[in-house]
Image (tube, rainbow, N blue to C red):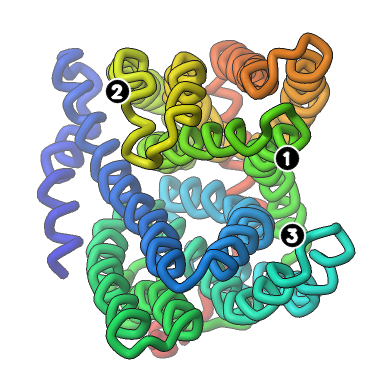
Amino acid sequence: MAADDISEKLLSKVQIQEGDSELKLKDKIWNEWKKMWVIAAPAIFTRFSTFGVNVISQAFIGHIGSIELAAYALVITVLLRFGNGILLGMASGLETLCGQAYGAKQYHMLGIYLQRSWIVLTVTATLLLPIFIFTAPILKALGQDETIAKEAGVISLWLIPVIYAFIASFTCQMFLQAQSKNMIISYLAACTLVIHIFLSWLLTVKFKFGITGAMISTLLAYWLPNIGQLIYVTCGGCKETWKGFTSLAFKDLWPVIKLSFSSGAMLCLELWYNTILILLTGNLKNAMVQIDALSICLNINGWEMMISLGFLAAACVRVSNELGRGSAKAARFSILTIVTTSFVIGFVLFLFFLFLRGRLAYIFTESEDVAEEVDHLSPLLAFSILLNSVQPVLSGVAVGAGWQSIVAYVNIGCYYLVGIPVGVVLGYVFKMQVKGVWVGMLFGVLTQTTVLLVITLKTDWDKQVLIAQQRVKKFFVEAEPNADSQTA
């Protein structure tokens, strides 16, 4: 397929020279760069497109009514993020397993891991359903406005299929990324974004279907690329790694469940950290201006984070592939190359946002008070972006190496025992308001980044190769004799 051809052309020279240990440094860097960007570029574009789906939905719903907008924002930022965090976190165990198995050339195991992950995540998603079914009474019990809670209850029912769409989305992306075949994902994401814009306009503006039209378009925007990915995976796009549906997927599920829980804990602790930041600002003086300014900053930070998450994917795949292949030296070199590249891009963006300061706010608001508050918060935004250029990459290294349980403990200590308490003290006790809360949260991220950096630098990567090989052997099962004939 076209997507595979592009990846193969970019990687062809690298594969020819893979056994040459005496390559010049500049050639090694260039080869590693090509491998990195084959993963990172489509991942960044895909994340921008996915992030754009919610932004487009929110824009069209905003023209329907303020109650609908408030309800949608509440459901997306709290409810969907909660479910997204759990499922994405548990799916990230698949990145470790697929990446290391692919590096070890145990290609048939990738398809088995994919199916095991589908089983685990389907059960998990089903357990989350009561939260979406009983959204309205839950929000009312928490003190939300009754009108907004009622509308949120309607919207949350529309998002139940989206929760199941996350299963296919996360797992197929990780399965394809492990093989550097994620170009197809970016093509599907681009097409979906165009379709979503058109359908949102058609159903909400032209036919005036209101919130129903907006949610139909949103639902299709989440499912269309997943249907495309599933067809690509099961119908010939991954002949080496997909051998058809197999009963082996139900074998040895418990180790996969344990790794999924560790991965889920690690990522959820990170994703919920920013949500707590918003909640902490709700009781501050002049909360409306504070929250508006913070929302603008977090919106900008969210867009920039899509770049960092692309490098996270690259770090995870490159480290897991090289550990599975048995090359500690190549794993170390991949980490150095990706961290350096991401940091340089982050530093450029750091300077950009530091100098623009409050002028960016006028893209989102006409309020002078909000713009002034954004101006005050801009240095913190710039430093957040700088930290984001390193921290997610180190998290990607951790996932690639299979350190999820260790990082979960690091996150608890740095975020919840350091960052949040410092933020509360600075924001409330020292009256620094939202700036104090954010400084505390940044301190937590800085502490976590420092700890992960020390762990990465002090790691015996030769030992990690042995651990990866043991993990690959532990999960290995022989392919079924008739596997090829079962291929969809």
Residue 397 percent location from the top left of the image: 51, 31
Which of the marked residues, 3 or 1, is nearer the chain's N terminus? 3
Quadrant in the picture for the C terminus: bottom left
Q: From the viewer's perspective, is 325 left or right of 84?
A: left
- Name the one closer to the observer, 151 or 390: 151
Disc 1 to disc 2, C-alpha distance: 31 Å
Which residue lies at the image location 50% right of the left edge and 61% below the top edge? 170
Which residue lies at the image location 77% right of the left edge and 16% below the top edge? 422
Which of the marked residues, 1 or 2, is nearer the chain's N terminus? 1
Specify few, some or many for label 2: CA neighbours under 10 Å numbering under 14, 14-19, or 20 or more: some
Disc 3 to disc 1, C-alpha distance: 31 Å
Q: Quadrant of residue 294?
A: top right
Q: Amino acid at mark 3?
A: Ile
Residue 57 percent location from the top left of the image: 42, 67
Specify few, some or many for label 3: CA neighbours under 10 Å numbering under 14, 14-19, or 20 or more: some
Q: Amino acid at mark 2?
A: Ile
Tell us which disc is closer to us: 3 or 1.
1
Instruction: Return the residue at label 3.
Output: 257
Q: Quadrant of residue 441?
A: top right
Residue 259 percent location from the top left of the image: 70, 50
Instruction: Return the residue at label 2.
Output: 345
